[in-house]
Structures are given as structure tokens and as C-alpha cells.
Image (cartoon, rainbow, N blue to C red):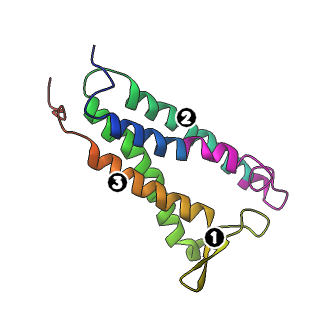
Amino acid sequence: MDSVFDSNIVARVLLTIVTAGYALAPLFADLNSTHATNPLWTPHARFHVVWQVLSYSGFGLIALSLIWTPGPYATTRLYLAGGFVVAVLLAFFITFASMRLFGGAHYDVNGYLPRPVPIFGRVVKFDANTTAFSIVTIILLLALISISGNDVNIAGQ
């Protein structure tokens, strides 16, 4: 049986980190009074956030099994797990860019507020989501770059 400790170990670790970012972090960040039990949110919006968080956690479990289960098509499975992350990140950035179309906002006044950070004499406000997703995007790119293509042959084996 193939080992998961192969030439893709760096990619596996990086993909595990980004998978935890979308599968575990929302359990702590969103299933609380800032989102799921926020009295200012409509009940239907709270339903959707809980559904989203639980769905991401389920996708994360599938991705982790793709990343760490030994077997054939290991490289292809790493790209598939990376594809889950791409889908989550792309959806976030598209939603962020199109907020004006549906009256959205990237934070609530009674939730996680942007933190002012002085940079070169200017104060820049960093939103937790945008900052975290930007960092995760960089880690994902490093993971995808580090995947060695030693068994990408999808057509047959």
C-alpha cells in the first residue's frame, strides 16, 4: 500500500491547514452570537449560516480523507481536495466583490469588527474574513505549487 509520507507531504500538510481553515474555523467563528444566534439576524439567515458551516465541515472531512488516505491517484486526489478550497475561496471573493448587488456587508456592527492597524503611518482596517481568506489563498497556492505530478495519469493505471 502506498504511503502518505511521499514527495507530496508538504502539499498534504498545507492542504490540511487550508482545509481546516474552511472546515473548522467557521464552527467557532460562526456558530455563536455573532452569526447563528445573532438576534438581529432573521431566522432564515441563521438557518443558512448553520447549514453553510455544517456543509463546509462535511466537505472538509471528505477533503481530509482525499488528502491522507493512501491509495491510487494520490496526486489527483490532492488536486481534488485543493479544488474544494478553490471553490470556497472563489465563492468568498466573488461574493465580496458583488456585495453592492444584494446589499451585503463583509461584517456586522455587532459581530467581528475590522481592526485598525498602523502601516507606514496610515491606519488600515483589516477585516477578519478578508485577511484570513487572503492568507489561506497564499497557502493554497503554495500547496498546489508543491504537488509533485508523479501519478496524475487520470486515463488509466
Q: Secondary structure at mark 3?
A: helix
Q: Is residue 80 above or below residue 127?
A: above
Give residue 113's quadrant in the image.
bottom right
- 130, 50: nearer the viewer: 130
Q: Which of the labelled discs sits on residue 104, or is there none? A: 1
Label 1 is placed on what type of residue? Gly
Residue 43, x across and y down, in percent? 79, 53
Q: Residue at x 73, y 67 (%)?
A: 108
Name the mark nearer the viewer: 3 or 2.
3
C-alpha span from label 1 to label 3? 28 Å
Left or right, 44 with respect to 117, comes to right
Q: Could you tell me how far apart the alpha carbons at marks 3 and 2 are, in whole angstroms?
A: 23 Å
Residue type (three-letter) at the residue carrying disc 3: Leu
Q: Which residue is mark 3?
A: 141
Residue found farthest to the front: 120
Whichever of callouts 2 and 1 sits on the residue coming sooner in the sequence is 2
Name which residue lies at 14% across and 26% down.
156
Looking at the image, is mark 1 or mark 3 nearer the viewer? 3
In the figure, 130 relative to 62: above or below? below
Q: Earlier in the sequence, mark 3 or mark 2?
A: 2
Closer to the camera in the image, 117 or 131: 117
Which segment is the magenta one? 22-45
- Which numbered disc, 1 or 3, marks the residue that appears first in the sequence? 1
Residue carrying label 2: 58
Q: Give the x, y percent position of residue 127.
A: 62, 68
